[in-house]
Amino acid sequence: MEKPVQEKPASKLKQGITGPMLYLFILGDVLGAGIYALVGEVSGKVGGAIWVPLLVALVLALLTAASYAELVTKYPKAGGAAVFAERAFKVPAISFLVGFAMLAAGVTSAAGLALAFTGDYLKPFLDVPPVPAALVFLLLVALLNARGISESVRSNVVMTVIEVSGLVLVIVLVGLMLGKGEGSPEQITQFPAGVNPGTAVLSASILAYYSFVGFEVSANVAEEVRDVRRVYPKALFGALLTAGLVYVLIGLAAAIALPTEELAGSTGPLLDVVSATGFGVPAWLFSLIALVAVANGALLTMIMSSRLTYGMAEQGLLPAVFGKVLPRRKTPWVAIIATTLVAMILTTTGGLGELAETVVLLLLFVFMSTNVAVIVLRRDTVEEKHFKTPLVVPYLAIASCILLLSQQDGSTWLRAGALMVVGLVLFAARRLAKGRTLGSKPRAPKDPAGDAPGKTHER
């Protein structure tokens, strides 16, 4: 029996990530802090039918995930949405804005998670005003970020297990509660009085979508995945479906255990659900699990944001000052300070729900770019066999992005717009510093080898 021919690695990076490892990586990015904080916000829009927008958000996420599966397996050396945009559109400003939108979404997400950390989950330990506490929390995250990431990376698996165990605990306790004939299962199909169910589901789907974002980060490790063309689609879709199943069960459990009016007003909704089951789980214990989940999400998001800022500075896309590092720690201190200050400002501009909607708005533009890139790059053929989604799927994904964008309110557009204006100013400043203008023809590259058409500018 012949053994399958293994694809030779075409990268200097070690291909050390197996299919199961990639599945856990994506699942850890998707499954986590958002659901701990947003169940109450979703319930405020759809009452007890929390599972419906979660299911809708899963379907919408899978559409865009199909585009990522095609582009990652077609260009396994590509580094994500910004590089896909560069290949497809050949316009530096567009690829920059796509990358900056991801950066802005990360910082905004960290601000929202900081507010989630200082809500009801913190009260069993410390009852303090949320916004000042969120600022202190972000400062502590920045100090840990500046110290180094090795400790955080080592502990991430453990913290992810803790996050998942908390969600499983909620599902099991409500299942036992239901087995005793308690709870209110009739609530799972009840919408708030006087609310149009279709409109409510669409509005809540924006928040629910926030719980599924994170899968796009996996494109950044494509070069380090063993046999990426074969395993990436399986790991990506498997992780999203697993997260979707857990989320739907959480939505059902929350609606069964607690009156929706109590759920909607809570900043620690799953803690209230656990307490309502009556099984005597100490409030401090579940609060601790939730705080670990939220803190881990905030830390990883700020690490990603600061490193992305540093990387864009190294590539000449942001001012060079953001590329400065601490001499001993080798951490990007200017990027850490800048992203932390922006996150601190954002905590004062809205609550958790508003910030989550801003994250989704920013990422919807990133996802729309990726979905359009799939269509544009269909004419670019590669010899290697790769995942190919039906052409109708990216069109449906683009329509889904437009649909969700249409549900965003004015304050969310204003917040996201202000962040992107900052990006445009930084982009213009960097171009002018190089003696260019936004519409001018780039100078010849200093590298005598030059760049091949469509190549990324990796450093």
Image (cartoon, rainbow, N blue to C red):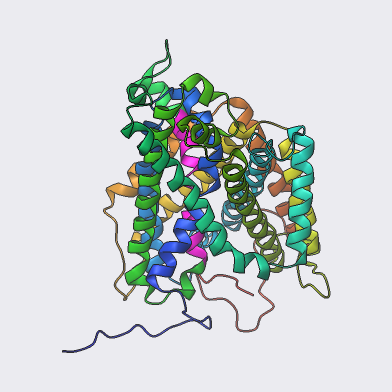
Viewport quadrant of the C terminus: bottom right
Which residue ends up furthest to the top in the rendered image? 194
Q: Position of residue 326 (x, y in %)?
A: 82, 70
Residue at the far right in the pictured view: 327
> Residue, x 35% and y 56% (percent of image)?
237
Furthest residue in direction left, as rendered: 1
- The answer to whether 16 appears left or right of 391 in the picture is right
Q: Nearer the viewer, residue 199 or 399?
A: 199
Q: Please tell me how many numbered marks the rendered image carries.
A: 0
> Is residue 351 on the magenta stretch?
no
Q: Does residue 307 sit above or below 261 in this rendering?
A: below
Give the percent coordinates (x, y) of residue 346. 72, 39
In this rendered view, identify the residue nearer to me: 196 or 249.
249
Give x and y (percent) for residue 98.
57, 52
Quadrant of the image for the N terminus? bottom left
Q: Is residue 31 visible?
A: no
Horizontal placement of 284 versus 397: left or right?
A: right
Query: Residue at 66% across / 35% down in the picture?
Result: 119
Q: Is residue 147 left or right of residue 381?
A: right
Residue 321 on image: x %, y %: 81, 63
Q: Is residue 56 above or below residue 165?
A: above
Q: Nearer the viewer, residue 296 or 78?
A: 296
Camera-nearest residue between 452 and 32: 32
- The kind of secondary structure the magenta stretch mainly shows is helix
Vertically, is 442 above or below 38? below
Tell me if residue 205 is in the magenta stretch.
Answer: yes
Q: Which residues are magenta?
A: 204-220
Residue at left offset 26%, top offset 53%:
390
In which quadrant of the rendered view does residue 19 lie? bottom left
> Does residue 41 appear anywhere in the picture?
yes
